[in-house]
Amino acid sequence: MTRLIEEVGLTRIIGELSNCIEEDFLRWNEFDKSARVANHSEIGVIELMPVSNASHYAFKYVNGHPENTASGLSTVMAFGVLAEVQTGYPILLSELTLATALRTCATSLMAARALARSDAKRMALIGNGAQAEFQAIAFHAHFGINEIAVYDVDPQATEKLLRNLAEYPKLKLIRANSIAQAVSGADIVTTVTADKTRATIVTPEMVEPGMHINAVGGDCPGKTELHADVLRGARVFVEYEPQTRIEGEIQQLDDDFPVVDLWQVLSGDQPGRQAREQVTVFDSVGFALEDYSTLRYVHQQVTKLGLGVDVELVPRMDDPKDLFRFTRSARAPLLRRVV
């Protein structure tokens, strides 16, 4: 994945991936969709995220364990598979830890293009951990954000962010001393915190007319980032409502609280922002279709660039009914090329 990013370029990948995700959202009704299957514990969650259409099936295995960093492990780790529906054969097995960060910022970008004010120039970035640089680069390179106020309860996370973004001299980074200071005057507010708690990162008094809030971090039952009154005072957009009702910011509200499907805004079936002063919220939890798009994009790129490794994941069978012969040591040649 690192070689792919180096070959194509980080900013180009983010832009192309955002377009790829939008293409698939515009084909929304072609996909067999379901909320992800999640196993929750007091310290984290492990999830399986499947989706398919008539040609391909994809799934992602992903975890979320906020305390992992204390042990030198990633908060989020993932891998995924893309397979042919016609035969069931896998054609790609890919890491999705790094790729999830790419698709998350690409999805945020896609939503902001549809919902935020087009002249937005200043963003607040609350949470400066593993996802932060990707969000900053996406909005700087592809939305025209030239000033970002950053804040994290961990000063070392902010130092890391500032160090990694030093190669973007046209992007002005402001170290804020509080969340309130960071969001003051922001056109877009992006929250990417990871604690498994019902938090209130953004409260009503922080919200200014016309803000677009990109709520990325809240993604499991019992974990939120926005005060419920922020949602009540905004037009709220979701990826896949059955999943967002369980895991998103709107889990705080009654089941009849109105939300808008983002795909319907992209297709023109529903309006997005209805007025310049309206507050919009993208209640992002991450949906399997975004991972399908990512696997589809990665497969296209590695095939074109000749990257990846062939593995004998599926054996060649001269007699497809004779699986027992593989209990002996004779090595069988590869049937299909799996990248």
Image: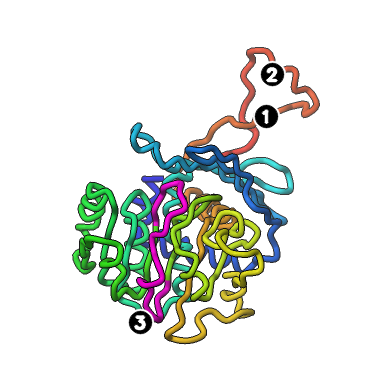
Say which residue label 2 marks: 326
* Left-right relation of 281 to 132: right
Q: Earlier in the sequence, mark 2 or mark 1?
A: 1
Between tags 2 and 3, which lies in front? 3
Say which residue label 3 marks: 119
Q: Residue 288: horizontal and vertical position, in percent?
A: 59, 53
- Specify whether residue 218 is painted magenta: no
Cα gap from disc 2 to disc 3, whole angstroms? 62 Å
Q: Nearer the viewer, residue 71 or 338?
A: 71
Cα gap from disc 2 to disc 1, whole angstroms? 10 Å
Q: Residue 218: horizontal and vertical position, in percent?
A: 48, 55
Cα gap from disc 3 to disc 1, whole angstroms? 57 Å
| Residue at the outermost right position | 321
Image quarter of residue 270: bottom right
Instruction: Please report the residue visible at 36 percent of the width from the left and 67 percent of the height from the top.
Output: 139
Height in image: 71 above or below 186?
Answer: above
* Left-right relation of 176 to 205: left
Height in image: 198 above or below 338?
Answer: below
Q: Nearer the viewer, residue 282 or 266?
A: 282
Q: Which mark is drawn over residue 207? A: none
Disc 3 marks which amino acid? Asp
Disc 1 marks which amino acid? Arg
Say which residue label 1 marks: 316
Question: SS of the residue at dot 1?
Answer: loop
